[in-house]
Each structure stands twice: as structure tokens, then as C-alpha cells.
Image (cartoon, rainbow, N blue to C red):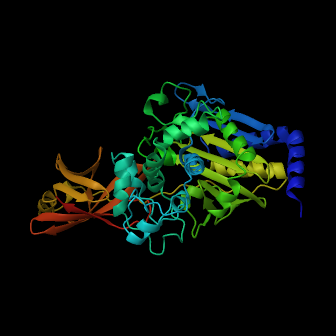
């Protein structure tokens, strides 16, 4: 067995002698992925590898904007998406020190701040439980992706979302909604919101001046990467209603400062992350795609997945949002930090690239897995006009508004002999299998996802619409009642 000191010494010697080897391996890997059709030519990629002493490797490839032929640079801004959670967790650790807050104490013990459906969970859930995803409420991501609710409104609707059986404090259940809801108790304790605190207490002291919370105005006025899915451009996804969970945007230069801070100055928080970890009981689908080499069943604590990199404890987090895929990784034991930013949708390339880099540094032969993306089945093609006249008449009775306490109001509209389902600012045509069952197709993360809608008709009027409004099959059916 090698000691940690020997491992660090060995790694540093390889860094000094093999930086050219890393560059060669990365360029070869990217070229291979393009030739194999797994990476679109001109995809923008920014990569940085550091240790506690400085830079090991930094490189940029492709275009941040293909139409304007603008190249990626070390200053190009990418959304880091869910890697924001590590900043939110650190903000809570800092606040706990200043305000003498015990993160493991019940969140609602003095004042109800985030109400949960289960009264026992509501009474005993802690900040630490939320920061480590052990509340048990499935993702319900379509609630923030498709609605126009503010962060505060979303937090208030969590009380109507059921947890999984045996989920509370026992199983890992990833939730952007709960992370974002932490804005409320944080503001009550700090008298400022999380974004302001993170900016003033973390980003500015680290001189991360290019790192900010996402606003649409910046997409066209700064050195910002544009989102793509394969050969096609995508629209920027607004995340302004879940900023604490996924709202930060940054570049390589700033992320180098963040990872170096984690390697040098965050050692006091390292035991806390290990202590608060959660064991993942089942693979998390595309969230961990390309990162299987870090452990098929990783742990999670305070905004980081916790796995093993060639036997060394490693913290990492992927970030996925429409048109972008990112990965941040650091290992105090291996004295290594990696940032990979790419303007490609739902890509496993960041994880595979990180594996390539780690294997090159350690001299271990690579193990490459092909990129895959979920492909949902095609929706039925029957419209209202295609149905028999008796069914058309029944379908006409579906027009109206329906409400669910968590998801709010949907509306069934008649548009040129077609029925549409309207939710928030979105509207989708309904396709029918029969008079009670229809499907609408939602575009999220560049995927066309068919979602069924079941209508319960009493007399001549529909009284309920049941919809599994989620990307997560474990989420229970939502029942929208006529209103």
C-alpha cells in the first residue's frame, strides 16, 4: 500500500513530466469521439486540470457559437448547473459557524419554514438532510421546468408532494426543489438571500468575478457559450426559480480558483462531507452517465457525489441543463482538481474525459464506455379530428380548467378542432387513444417526452385529469380536479 504522501509525490512527478502526454491523450480522445459520431464537430469544450500548486493542463476546443464562428476560451462562460449545490452547501456551513446554527437540528422546530406532507418528516427534517438529498421526495423537476412559479411559490408547494415509502432519512432521492427551498430558512437566519451571501462571502473572497447567478440578459452580452444538441442549436433554459440548486455560471479561470480552494482551504469541511454522506441505493440514470468508473453506487454529501478515483476518495458533481454538460471533480487525497465544460446536451463526454485524464496521470489503462441518451417511444398520432364523432363530442366536454395543489392549474383548450393542454406558458396538442386517454409531448433537456393524460368523465363533463407529471417514474400520479 502507498501512503497518501507517496501518492501525492508520485502524482506531482508525473504532472511535471507528462503534461504533454495529457494534452496528447485529450486531443486523441476528442478526435476519436468526433470520428465515432459521439461528439459533434466544433462542439465547444473547456478543460482544466490542477493541483494545489497550480495548473497541470488547460485547453479549449471548438466553438462557443457555431453561427458566428466564435471559439471557446478560458474566459467563456458556461452554466455549471447542479454544481451550484456545492456553493449552497458551503454557504450553509459558513452561516452555521457565524450564527451558531446546528445543521442537523430539525429545520421547523422553532418556525415552520419548509412544510412537508408527512407530519413526522416535517417535524424532524434538517438542513443537513436536504443538503444530502435524504428527504425522500422524488425530483418532480417538471414542476420548476414548466411552471412559472417563483422559488418561494415552489417551496410552498412541496408540502403537497409525497415522499417514497421508506424514503425519509433512509434513501438518497435527488431534489432540485428542496435545495432551492433552502432559500427561505437561509434568508430568515442571514437576513439576505443565498445568492447574495454566496456572491459576497464565497465568490468575491476567491476573486471569482466572472461567476454569477444566471440571468437571460447575459447570454448575448458576454463571452457566453451557446447551447446545442448534436447539430442543432437550443434555447437557453431559465433556472431563475431554482437558483440555489442550479443557477451559477462560470468559466475555467474562476473554477480553477474554486477547486484550488477546495484542495487547500476546505479541509475542515472534508470530514463533514464524509459524515453527512448518503448511500445511493440505485443507479441514478443519466445523472451519473459516463461517471460509472467512480463507483456504480456512490455516496452523496453537501453538494458532492463521493466516489473512488483509482482507490482515492473523490468528490464530483455533474451539471446538466439544456444544451450543456459539465463536471467538477476534486480529490484531496490525490491532490487533483478537474473542470470540464461542454456545450452539448446530455453528454457523457465530461465523465469519460475525466476518466481519461485520471488514468493518464496514474498510468492506468483507460476504460471507455459509449455515450447513450434515453430515447422515449414515439407518441400516438391520433388527433381529436381523427376520432369517431361520438368520441369527438366527449372530447369537447373536456374543455376547462383543472387544479392540483402542487402543480397548480392546467387548462384544456379547443384550438382549430384540436384540444390542447396548457400549463404555465406552455401549450401542447393532445393526441387521443380513446375518449378517456390522451398523450401530449413535452420537450425537456432536448428530449421529446410523451406524457399520458387520463380523463375521468362524469355525465357530460370531465371532473378529473390524472397526469404523471414527472421525468421520474417513481413520482405518483397527479390528479387535477375540475375548477
Drawn side of residue 413 relative to residue 315, left or right: left
Q: Quadrant of the C terminus?
A: bottom left
Residue 119 rendering spot, x and y as whole percentages:
38, 70
Residue 465 rendering spot, x and y as whole percentages:
24, 63
**Residue 345 visible in rendering:** no
Drawn side of residue 440 relative to residue 308, left or right: left
Please state which of residues 421 and 407 is positioned toward the viewer in this rendering. Answer: 407
Give the answer, above or below, for where 421 lies relative to 210: below
Q: Residue at x 62, y 54 (%)?
A: 304
**Residue 449 visible in rendering:** yes
Give the answer, above or below, for where 125 lies relative to 223: below
* Outermost residue toward the bottom in this view: 166
- State the image quarter where residue 469 is shown: bottom left
Please state which of residues 190 and 168 is positioned toward the viewer in this rendering. Answer: 190
Q: Quadrant of the N terminus?
A: bottom right
Q: Residue at x 66, y 43 (%)?
A: 340
Please state which of residues 180 and 64 is positioned toward the viewer in this rendering. Answer: 180
Drawn side of residue 184 relative to residue 223, left or right: left
Q: Residue at x 55, y 58 (%)?
A: 103
Could you tell me how many numbered marks the image carries? 0
- State the image quarter where residue 311 is shown: bottom right
Give the answer, above or below, for where 435 lies relative to 363: below
Please state which of residues 157 and 442 is positioned toward the viewer in this rendering. Answer: 157
Residue 165 rendering spot, x and y as whole percentages:
44, 74
Q: Residue at x 68, y 49 (%)?
A: 329
Residue 357 rendering spot, x and y as whole percentages:
76, 47
* Outermost residue toward the left in this view: 460
Amino acid at each position: 500500500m502507498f501512503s497518501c504522501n507517496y501518492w501525492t509525490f508520485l502524482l506531482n512527478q508525473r504532472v511535471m513530466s507528462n503534461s504533454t502526454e495529457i494534452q496528447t491523450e485529450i486531443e486523441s480522445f476528442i478526435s476519436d469521439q468526433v470520428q465515432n459520431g459521439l461528439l459533434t464537430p466544433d462542439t465547444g469544450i473547456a478543460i482544466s486540470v490542477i493541483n494545489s500548486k497550480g495548473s497541470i493542463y488547460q485547453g479549449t476546443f471548438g466553438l462557443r457559437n457555431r453561427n458566428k464562428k466564435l471559439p471557446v476560451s478560458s474566459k467563456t462562460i458556461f452554466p455549471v448547473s447542479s454544481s451550484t449545490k456545492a456553493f449552497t452547501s458551503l454557504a450553509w456551513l459558513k452561516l452555521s459557524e457565524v450564527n451558531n446554527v446546528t445543521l442537523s437540528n430539525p429545520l421547523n422546530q422553532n418556525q415552520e419554514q419548509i412544510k412537508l406532507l408527512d407530519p413526522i418528516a416535517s417535524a424532524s427534517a434538517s438542513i443537513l438532510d436536504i443538503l444530502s438529498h435524504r428527504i425522500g421526495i422524488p425530483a418532480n423537476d417538471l414542476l420548476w421546468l414548466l411552471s412559472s412559479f417563483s422559488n418561494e411559490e415552489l417551496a410552498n408547494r412541496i408540502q403537497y408532494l409525497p415522499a417514497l415509502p421508506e424514503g425519509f432519512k433512509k434513501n438518497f432521492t435527488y431534489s432540485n426543489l428542496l435545495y432551492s427551498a433552502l432559500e427561505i430558512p437561509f434568508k430568515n437566519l442571514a437576513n439576505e438571500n443565498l445568492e447574495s451571501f454566496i456572491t459576497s462571502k464565497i465568490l468575491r473572497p476567491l476573486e471569482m468575478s466572472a461567476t454569477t447567478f444566471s440571468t437571460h440578459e447575459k447570454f448575448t452580452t458576454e463571452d457566453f457559450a451557446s447551447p446545442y444538441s448534436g447539430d442543432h442549436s437550443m434555447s437557453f433554459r431559465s433556472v431563475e426559480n431554482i437558483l440555489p440548486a442550479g443557477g451559477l455560471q462560470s468559466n475555467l479561470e474562476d473554477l480553477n480558483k474554486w477547486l484550488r480552494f477546495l484542495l487547500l482551504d476546505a479541509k475542515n469541511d472534508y470530514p463533514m462531507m464524509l459524515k453527512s454522506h448518503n448511500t445511493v441505493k440505485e443507479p441514478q440514470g443519466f445523472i451519473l452517465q459516463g461517471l460509472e468508473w467512480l463507483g456504480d453506487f456512490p455516496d452523496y454529501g453537501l453538494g458532492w457525489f463521493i466516489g473512488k478515483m483509482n482507490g482515492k476518495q473523490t468528490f464530483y458533481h455533474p451539471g446538466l441543463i439544456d444544451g450543456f454538460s459539465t463536471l467538477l471533480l476534486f480529490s484531496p487525497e490525490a491532490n487533483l482538481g478537474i473542470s470540464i465544460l461542454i456545450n452539448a446536451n446530455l453528454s457523457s463526454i465530461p465523465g469519460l474525459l475525466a476518466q481519461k485524464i485520471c488514468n493518464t496521470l496514474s498510468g492506468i489503462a483507460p476504460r471507455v464506455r459509449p455515450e447513450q441518451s434515453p430515447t422515449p417511444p414515439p407518441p400516438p398520432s391520433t388527433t381529436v379530428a381523427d376520432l369517431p364523432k361520438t368520441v369527438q363530442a366527449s372530447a369537447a366536454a373536456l374543455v376547462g380548467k383543472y387544479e392540483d395543489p402542487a402543480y397548480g392549474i392546467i387548462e384544456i383548450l379547443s384550438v382549430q378542432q384540436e384540444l390542447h393542454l396548457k400549463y404555465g406558458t406552455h401549450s401542447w396538442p393532445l393526441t387521443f387513444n380513446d375518449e378517456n386517454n390522451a398523450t401530449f409531448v413535452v420537450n425537456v433537456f432536448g428530449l421529446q417526452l410523451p406524457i399520458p393524460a387520463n380523463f375521468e368523465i362524469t355525465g357530460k363533463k370531465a371532473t378529473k385529469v390524472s397526469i404523471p407529471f414527472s421525468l421520474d417514474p417513481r413520482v405518483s400520479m397527479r390528479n387535477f380536479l375540475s375548477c
